[in-house]
Image (spheres, helix red, strand yellow):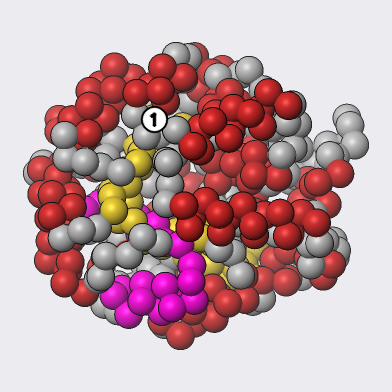
C-alpha cells in the first residue's frame, strides 16, 4: 500500500464520519471580526455568483493542520514567503503547550509541522511526541540540514514522516535554496534517518523553469535510498512572493504536469489521481482551504496557507468568520492561478465533482 494501513483506515474513517455528521458550529458564516491589518491584502474579494456551490462545500471540517511553531529559518529559499511575510515576528515561537492546544482544538487527524524550519524549534522532539500521544499522523517538513544533529530526539513511528524539501538534483536544489551544500546535507540526513528506521517523504516545488525530466531523475535517485513517498506542489505566486518570472499560471501548470500519470505509476507519489487530473486540466475542483487550516505565532491564519487576510484567536472564529464564498478561482483574483494541494486535495477527500471512475482510480491508487 502507498501509506501504512492504520493511516489509510484512520483518515478514511475520519472523513466518512465528518461527511455524515460535520460539527454544526463550523458550518456557520458570521461577519468577520479578525485582525485584518495585513500589508499583503492587495485585493478585495468578490463573491463568485456564477453557480451555486457544491452541497459538500457546506460540510466544513479540517483534514490536515498546518502547524508553524516558528517562522525562523537557516535558508532564504527563492519561493518562500514566510520569512518575508512574518519578518516582524521572525524570532517568535509558539510554546509547545499552545501548539498542542491547537492540535486539540482543530482535531484534524494529520499534522504537517512546517515553518520556517521546524528543526530549529528547541522543543521539536517534545512537540512531535505530544502530537503522537494524541494519535495523530505527522509530516515534519524540513530542509534536512538538522536531521543528523537532532535525530536522537525522535523515535521511529508508523505515524511519523520526515518530509524533506528537495526541488531538484544537487545543482538545481542548491540554486533554489540559495546556498551550496544543502542538497548533500539533506541526502545525508535522509540516509541517517532511514538507517535509524524512520519513514521519509520528500516535497518538491515545481517552478516555471523546472525540468520535469530532472524531477524523474531525482525520484529515481531517491528510490535507491528507499524514500517512502513523494509530494509535488506547483509554485504559486501569492502576495508575499509574487514574482511571475518563476511562478506559473494555471495554463502553465496544466502544461507542466502533462504526463504525470506515467511518473505516478513508477514512483510513490502521495497525491491522489483526481488531484493530478486537476493539475493537468482534465478536471475542475473547488478550493476547500478550510480543510488545511494554518496555526502560527499570530493564531489561526485565514483564509489559507498562502493568503493572509486575518488571524483569529480560536479555530471556531477561523471557520465561521472567514468568508469562504469569496475565495477560490472565480472569486478572489489572488486565487486565480492557485492549484496547490493544500487548497484542493480536501475536495478530493470529500468526493466533490467525483465520478464513479474517479472513485475506482482512487481506490486503485491507495492499494498500489
Quadrant of the rendered structure where residue 70 is? bottom left
Q: Is residue 258 above or below residue 287?
A: above
| Circle 1 residue | 206
Q: Quick one: 64 or 70, which is closer to the camera?
A: 64
| Crowdedness near tag 1: few (<14), some (14–19) or many (≥20) residues, C-alpha within 10 Å | many
Q: Quadrant of the C terminus?
A: top left
> Residue at position x 62%, y 70% from top?
106
Quadrant of the rendered structure where residue 231 is? top left
> Residue at position x 30%, y 60% from top?
117
The percent coordinates of residue 338 (x first, y second) are 58, 35
Residue 130 lies in magenta, yes or no? yes
Specify whether 176 is left or right of 84: left
The percent coordinates of residue 69 (x first, y second) are 41, 70
Q: Is residue 79 above or below residue 29?
A: above
Q: Is residue 281 above or below residue 6?
A: above
Specify whether 45 is left or right of 75: right
Q: Quick one: 25 or 195, which is closer to the camera?
A: 195
The percent coordinates of residue 229 (x first, y second) are 35, 41
Residue 131 shows in the view: yes
Task: Please tell me how many numbered marks the rendered image carries.
Answer: 1
Residue 244 lies in magenta, yes or no? no
Specify whether 126 is left or right of 28: left
Q: Is residue 54 above or below residue 90?
A: above
> Residue at position x 29%, y 75% from top?
125
Q: Secondary structure at mark 1?
A: strand
In magenta, the rendered stretch is: 124-144
Specify whether 258 is left or right of 151: right
Amino acid at each position: 500500500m502507498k501509506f501504512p494501513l492504520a493511516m489509510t483506515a484512520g483518515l478514511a474513517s475520519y472523513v466518512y464520519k465528518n461527511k455524515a455528521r460535520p460539527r454544526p458550529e463550523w458550518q456557520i458564516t458570521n461577519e468577520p471580526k479578525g485582525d485584518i491589518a495585513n500589508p499583503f491584502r492587495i485585493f478585495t474579494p468578490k463573491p463568485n455568483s456564477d453557480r451555486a456551490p457544491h452541497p459538500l462545500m457546506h460540510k466544513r471540517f479540517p483534514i490536515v493542520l498546518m502547524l508553524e511553531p516558528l517562522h525562523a529559518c537557516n535558508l532564504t529559499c527563492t519561493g518562500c514567503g514566510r520569512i518575508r511575510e512574518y519578518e516582524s515576528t521572525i524570532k517568535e515561537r509558539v510554546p509547545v503547550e499552545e501548539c498542542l492546544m491547537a492540535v486539540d482544538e482543530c482535531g484534524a487527524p494529520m499534522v504537517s509541522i512546517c515553518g520556517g524550519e521546524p528543526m530549529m524549534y528547541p522543543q521539536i522532539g517534545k512537540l512531535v511526541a505530544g502530537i503522537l500521544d494524541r494519535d495523530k499522523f505527522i509530516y515534519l517538513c524540513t530542509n534536512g540540514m538538522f536531521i543528523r544533529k537532532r535525530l536522537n530526539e525522535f523515535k521511529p513511528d508508523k505515524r511519523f514522516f520526515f518530509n524533506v524539501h528537495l526541488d531538484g538534483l544537487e545543482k538545481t536544489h542548491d540554486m533554489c535554496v540559495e546556498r551550496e551544500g544543502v542538497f548533500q546535507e539533506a541526502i545525508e540526513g535522509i540516509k541517517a534517518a532511514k538507517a535509524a528506521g524512520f519513514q521519509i517523504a520528500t516535497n518538491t516545488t515545481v517552478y516555471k523553469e523546472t525540468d520535469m525530466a530532472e524531477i524523474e531523475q531525482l525520484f529515481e535517485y531517491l528510490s535507491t535510498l528507499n524514500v517512502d513517498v513523494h509530494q509535488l506542489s506547483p509554485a504559486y505566486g501569492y502576495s508575499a512572493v509574487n514574482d511571475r518570472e518563476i511562478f506559473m499560471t494555471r495554463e502553465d501548470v496544466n502544461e507542466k504536469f502533462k504526463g504525470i500519470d506515467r511518473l505516478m505509476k513508477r514512483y510513490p507519489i502521495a497525491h491522489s489521481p483526481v488531484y493530478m487530473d486537476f493539475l493537468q486540466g482534465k478536471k475542475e475542483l473547488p478550493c476547500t482551504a478550510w480543510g488545511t487550516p494554518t496555526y502560527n505565532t499570530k493564531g489561526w491564519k485565514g483564509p489559507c496557507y498562502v493568503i493572509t487576510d486575518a488571524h483569529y484567536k480560536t479555530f471556531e472564529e477561523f471557520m465561521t468568520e472567514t468568508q469562504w464564498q469569496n475565495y477560490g478561482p472565480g472569486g478572489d483574483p489572488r486565487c486565480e492561478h492557485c492549484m496547490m494541494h493544500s487548497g484542493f486535495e480536501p475536495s478530493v477527500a470529500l468526493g466533490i465533482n467525483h465520478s464513479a471512475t474517479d472513485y475506482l482510480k482512487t481506490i486503485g491508487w491507495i492499494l498500489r
